[in-house]
Image: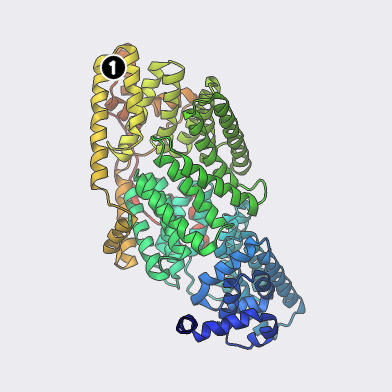
Amino acid sequence: MEAMELDWMAKSLKGCCLSIISDNFIKFENATLTLPVSLQFAVFHQLYLDGKLDLLAKVFSDLEIFSRMLTVKKRRLDLHRSFQAIRDRDIKISEVIAESYSKQASDIQQSSLDDDENDFDSTISRGFHLGGFFLEAGWNEDASRVLSACIVLCLHNHCFLKAFHCVTKLLHTYNADCLYKETEQMFSTAQEIFQSLRLFMPDVELNLASLFMEYGAYHFAKSEYDKAYRWSIEAVRMLKQPGYVSETTMIDVLRLATRACVVKRQFKAAEHLVRHAVYLAREVFGALHPKYSSTLMDYGFYLLNVDNVSQSLKAYQTALAIREHVFGGQNLHVAVAHEDLAYASYVHQYSTGKFDEALSHADKAIKILTKILPKNHLLLASSNRVKALILEEIAIDSEDQHFQKKLLAESHQLHLKSMELAMNAFGENNVQTAKHFGNLGRLYQSMELYEKAEEMHLKAIAIKEELLGPNDYEVALSIGHIASLYNYDMKQYEKAERLYLRSIAISKQLYGDGYSGLEYDYRGLIKIYAKLGDFEKMIEYDYILSQWYSIREQRRSTALNGLHDLIADTDQEQAQNTRVIIDTFFETITSDTDKSPQNVIQNRTRTSHDIAFAGPVHEQACADRQQSGNNPHEINANHAASSNSMPSSINVDSYESFFPDDDEISVALKKFHVMPLKIKSFKRRKIKSE
């Protein structure tokens, strides 16, 4: 008897009532809808907990009811969980609600009840919040439908300010769904709405940080990194301007600027921003919120790119755990987290050959994306690429030739499909397409198709160098790969040596003497010198490799123990005003701009071999080669570094604006009454190299 009483007491009176209502929901449904909204939510959540998802789907399909649930802000994550559980049952509830809203918006517009502003305002507000919820949950197509209908209604009723905010959200939706033409069109619409705002509401304080951030994210997705960098900087600058900026916008602006600085190799600036974004997201939203997981994904991206792979892995693992907790299984955000973790695991275990975990995450990402996206969606290109890389490494390590050929063939098909999707979306002259060329080059090397491998690698190098400059990490990566091809398979040791030296020079310039990728270049050089009988050089690089091991071991011994330590360390540094972080950021990028060598490629016709082997033309290096009888063995790593870090003439003089004021970005900014940012750098005047 006592045990039974304790069992009953363990469940609160409220919980008992909710269970009774859930068990008899059909009987109590009408009465439930008369309760306060918070209690209605509690009843519906109990339906979710009891697994009565068909009943819950029926309730949530009512636009009025679901819209009320969106107002219960404190239980947003519970709403996401229950909504995703319904979607996982293959009940397309988001499509039903989006269709219902679109019809309601159309009916109100056609009724022409201009004197009833409440109907317009409430429907517009409903569309804005409903579209935002779908966007948070990753149901981009349904979000687009709702927000598009909302914009039409806004413009019909001359609600330009609300239309502008809807357009910003729709930009995010289109970009997340890889609809890049629509993104461009919507940005033009934003410019038109802004002009109307200035005409009819000249005194309104409108902050443009969110709009600039979304347009920068669009350029980042297309690998147009210079443009993404420009827009991200302008978005950060807008955070200090008048007008309301939400905490979500503030965090997302810092996130984009982080990614843009990482690809521009401005790591110090990126670190300032991403650590503050992580701190803000956890302080504002909590450690189990999707926004916090997104900042951890960006932190993982930063850590991976600064060669802190083990900590990057932990950031991605934590981000995935949060997203699985909030969204469950068949969700776009979960798939993206699986993909990023798959790649980080692949990099982390590259030297060990243990790819089971990486392959598992890649398979999960592809399974989810295949289920929820159209067959040829661009997002599949990246997941297929990651799986193809993993399969190739597993094949290489296998001693079973039949199994090896099977995996290589599967990897080939995945790479070709990814290449097709990238070419259709971006064309050939794009960084993403170049990566696919490079991946095919590696695969063809594994398949012993050496001439095709060489062709793919040279294509990748040519595109990357044109778009990113000769000293970028991506260029060094491809140079190292083709050096491996020449060294291990084509026995062209002189070519391989020159390429290894160039790869080493770029890597050390970007990451220092302890960069993980240097191991493979050093090992390659040792093999070359052994084959050529240059034992002095072989011993020299064997010693350099041993020094590299010492540096790596020192890093491991001094590294923080885990992500928790890393985040705790971040807390101590970042508990300061965001304005201070922004000021520090601009000081950092100004300093980086002043110090960084310009990645300028001289205007002359160069073949892909010129690009791969020489980088920018350097007269002194050419003279050195001539004096040494074109013997590459006499050109040391220091000469290789200098020949690939500066053109034959460098430009230094007084300071001038780093960004031009008449390019397309500056013209676009002026349409928003924003004068382009002036970051000072060296004015470029040609002088001869010493």
Q: Relative to 352, does residue 136 appear above or below in the rendering?
A: below
Count all numbered tags in the image, as a single digit. Answer: 1
Q: Residue at x 49, y 76 (%)?
A: 74
Mark 1 residue element: helix
Q: Residue at x 27, y 44 (%)?
A: 556
Of residue 687 and residue 381, the one placed in the foreground of this image is 381
Residue 129: percent from the left, percent from the top? 58, 72
Q: Relative to 547, does residue 258 appear above or below in the rendering?
A: below
Residue 482: percent from the left, percent from the top? 45, 26
Residue 664 visible: no
Q: Residue 686 vs residue 364: left or right?
A: left
Residue 256, quarter of picture? bottom left
Which residue has dot 1 on it? 634
Residue type at tag 1: Glu
Q: Relative to 187, does residue 619 appear above or below in the rendering?
A: above
Residue 32: percent from the left, percent from the top? 63, 85
Residue 580 visible: yes
Q: Residue 297 vs residue 541: left or right?
A: right
Q: Relative to 113, does residue 273 appear above or below in the rendering?
A: above
